[in-house]
Every structure is written in structure tokens, then in C-alpha cells.
Image (tube, rainbow, N blue to C red):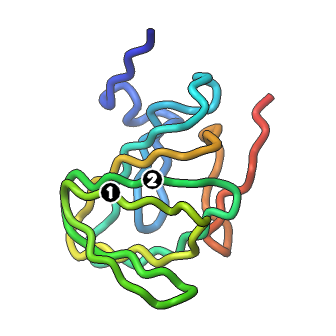
Amino acid sequence: MKVVKLEDVIGTEQEVKGENWTSRRLLLKKDGMGYSVHDTIIKAGTETHIWYQNHLEAVYCIEGEGEVETVKDGKVWPIKANEIYALDEHDEHLLRAKTDMRMVCVFNPPITGKETHDENGVYPLVDDE
């Protein structure tokens, strides 16, 4: 069994910061679970272009308010605390935070922890072997 405390991840290489977000990566590929789990903060007033071409992601909002817009059809979904959205078709999307948002994100396949978004909002597949 494994227990990971958020406080033990903050300030380590498993806390990764982007312009609009901070991702605290709790479980990674190396943990052998078949998925990764992240505690992510999205900064208020930001818009982030994301397109996980290589990963599926489920996102559970535990704090804050914002919206997700799917690029292919322009559909907008309001998101607030206690709601989950699933990017089950590798959906290219825009995430807009009205307030600071705290999200629990689950990725399949799991990320290694080395990934950051490229110019298209994509996490590349990284082999950490």
C-alpha cells in the first residue's frame, strides 16, 4: 500500500508549474497503478488551451468555478465544485477559470511527471524507462 500526502509533494519535482496552473502529481506511471492522479490549481481569470491527444483525462472540481469549451463544436460547459468532466474523446478544449479552481485530475495512460503542455496543449508520451 502507498500513502501520499500533498504536503510531501509541494516543493518537489512532482509539483510542476505552468503559466496558468500548478500541478501536484500524486501518483505517476512509476507507481504502477495504470493511471496518474494530480491535484491541480487553475489560476482565476485564465484561459488554458489543452488537447490531450495521447491521454484520456477525468477532472473532478473540488473548489472554484469556471467553464470548459470544446473546440470542435464550441459547446461550453459550466464547471463548479463537486462536478466531474471526462475528456473521453481526446477533446481539444479551452479551460477558463472564473475563480481559482482546484481539480483532481486522473490520466490514462499515466504520465511520468516529466510532461508539460507543448505549443498545441498536448502532453507527449514520455517513456521513463
Image vertical order of residue 73 relative to residue 26, above or below: below
Q: Which quarter of the image is occupied by the N terminus?
A: top left
Q: Nearer the viewer, residue 121 or 88?
A: 88
Q: Which quarter of the image is occupied by the C terminus?
A: top right
Mark 2 highlights which residue?
Answer: 58
Image vertical order of residue 52 relative to residue 128, above or below: below
User: Mark 1 and mark 2: span between their CA atoms?
Assistant: 7 Å
Q: Locate residue 22, reporting x and y percent.
A: 41, 53
Mark 1 highlights which residue?
Answer: 84
Image vertical order of residue 126 relative to residue 75, above or below: above
> Which residue corresponds to the image point at 37% horizontal and 35% vertical from the top-left?
10
Label ID, residue 118: none
Q: Secondary structure at mark 2?
A: strand
Q: Secondary structure at mark 1?
A: strand
Q: Is residue 11 left or right of residue 65?
A: right
Q: Locate residue 3, reporting x and y percent.
A: 38, 16
Q: Amino acid at mark 2?
A: Ala
Q: Amino acid at mark 1?
A: Ile
